[in-house]
């Protein structure tokens, strides 16, 4: 009888541990999704005041790596530069989340992006054209 009780106790303890691990993983995934949504809010509003709260010092935008000046930027400074450049070129820029999938440290967002090109965007000159694109963003 004692053997069965101890086996049952071990099984219950393993279930408790698995439940805590699962809950911690779920919290991490939700936290990562929240960071992506905070970044989208900054892109939509241009409000840079809270970027240091959720952009890592290691952050960098792969697309900016072709520019010799921007490729040296990292962290909140790089994200601020990206937001300012986008908002200057597309003052009515709007990102709409269509779907988000997350697992562990990875988040993939499917987005609908709209905006009218009203200023220079890096090497792309003013076009005065309204854009509506579908974008997939991968964040790790």
Image: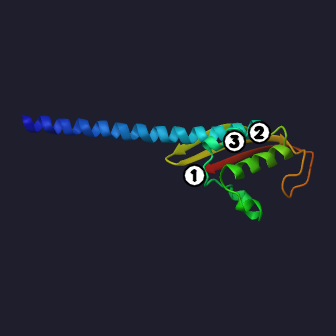
Residue at x 40%, y 39% (from the top left corner): 22
Q: Assess disc 2: are there few (<14), some (14-19) or many (≥20) residues with their C-alpha within 10 Å of its C-alpha.
A: some
Pick the front one: 54 or 103:
54
Question: Residue 111 shows which numbered tag?
Answer: 3
What element does badge 1 sit on?
loop
Q: Is residue 96 visible?
A: no
Q: Mark 2 to mark 3: distance in Å?
A: 18 Å
What element does badge 2 sit on?
loop
Residue at the spot of label 2: 46
User: Which part of the image, by quadrant, shows the N terminus?
Assistant: top left
Residue at x 11%, y 36% (from the top left corner): 4
Which comes before the other along the chain, label 2 or label 1?
Answer: 2
Question: Does the residue at mark 2 contact the one at mark 1 (Cβ under 8 Å)?
Answer: no
Q: Assess disc 3: are there few (<14), some (14-19) or many (≥20) residues with their C-alpha within 10 Å of its C-alpha.
A: some
Compared with residue 114, is residue 69 higher up or lower down, i.e. above or below? below
Which comes before the other along the chain, label 2 or label 3?
Answer: 2
Q: Which of marks 2 and 3 is in front?
A: 2
Question: Residue 140 shows which numbered tag?
Answer: 1
Q: Mark 1 to mark 3: distance in Å?
A: 17 Å
Compared with residue 62, is residue 102 higher up or lower down, i.e. above or below? above
Which comes before the other along the chain, label 1 or label 3?
Answer: 3
Q: Can residue 17 be seen in this view?
A: yes
Q: Assess disc 1: are there few (<14), some (14-19) or many (≥20) residues with their C-alpha within 10 Å of its C-alpha.
A: few
Which corner quadrant of the image does residue 123 belong to? Answer: bottom right
Indicate the position of residue 107 as horizontal and vertical percent values: 57, 46
Compared with residue 86, is residue 37 higher up or lower down, i.e. above or below? above
């Amino acid at each position: 009888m004692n053997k069965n009780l101890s086996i049952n106790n071990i099984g219950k303890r393993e279930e408790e541990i698995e439940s805590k691990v699962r809950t911690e993983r779920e919290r991490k995934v939700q936290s990562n999704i929240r960071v992506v949504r905070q970044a989208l809010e900054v892109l939509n509003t241009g409000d840079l005041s809270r970027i240091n709260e959720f952009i890592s010092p290691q952050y960098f935008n792969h697309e900016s790596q072709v520019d010799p000046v921007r490729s040296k930027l990292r962290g909140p400074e790089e994200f601020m530069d990206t937001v300012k450049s986008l908002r200057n070129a597309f003052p009515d820029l709007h990102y709409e989340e269509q779907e988000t999938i997350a697992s562990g440290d990875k988040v993939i967002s499917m987005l609908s992006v709209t905006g009218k090109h009203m200023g220079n965007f890096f090497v792309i000159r003013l076009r005065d054209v309204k854009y509506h694109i579908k974008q997939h963003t991968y964040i790790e």
